[in-house]
Amino acid sequence: MSRIAAIALGSNLASPWGDREANLREAVRRVGQLGEVRAVSSFHNTAPVGTTEQPKFLNGAMLLENELEPVELMRALLAIERAMGRNRASVPAKGPRTIDLDLLLMDDLVLDADELTLPHPAMAERRFVLEPLAEIAPAMVDPVTGRTVAEMLARLADR
């Protein structure tokens, strides 16, 4: 069964592929091997959240049509991160990274497993996630709250 996955992209370090933008483009290419890329947002320069003593991030979002189960897709995204030089175990959770891939939504699936929570639990609080996602999927719905991406972004703007 084919599903549309919304995936957040982020980078704030250079890598063998080049600068932050090159990292995001390489990640999109690799993620595209898991299915069919339906859309990619523009990339947004954003300040770091949490650990602020680090370079600015470049963030984006993409939609991937694929036939993987959610946990399989998340494992594949983590494998891409590792292949691109990210070791989640050796750096702080909110620290600098060559690439960060987060599975945000997958159609209307709701999942609470050890490896993955869908929808992404912090998505609605993160402008750097919602702004690029709203460019490519403003009507995509969080199946838990019933809010669209555009509505979640508007709620952040009201604060």
Image (spheres, helix red, strand yellow):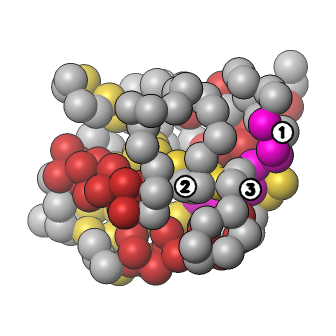
> What is the three-letter code of the residue carrying label 3?
Leu
Q: Say if residue 25 shows up in the picture.
A: no
Question: Residue 86 shows which numbered tag?
Answer: none
**Disc 3: which residue:** 58
- Using residue 56 as the reference point, say whether residue 106 is left or right of it: left
Q: Which residue is drawn at 72% across and 69% down?
A: 19
Q: What element carries label 3?
A: strand
Distance, label 1 to label 2, CA atoms, is 15 Å
**Disc 2: which residue:** 99
Badge 3, how many Cα within 10 Å: few under 14, some, many 20+? many
**Predominant SS of the magenta segment:** strand
Expressed as whole percent of the image width and height from the top left, the position of residue 149 reads: 61, 44
> What is the three-letter code of the residue carrying label 2?
Ile
> What is the three-letter code of the residue carrying label 1?
Ala
Badge 1, how many Cα within 10 Å: few under 14, some, many 20+? some
**Disc 1: which residue:** 47
Highlighted magenta segment, given as a residue range: 54-61
Q: Which residue is drawn at 46% across and 25% down?
A: 121
- Using residue 149 as the reference point, say whether residue 135 is left or right of it: right
Q: What element carries label 2?
A: loop
Distance, label 1 to label 3, CA atoms, is 9 Å
From the viewer's perspective, is the residue at label 2 or at label 3 nearer? 2
Q: Is residue 88 magenta?
A: no
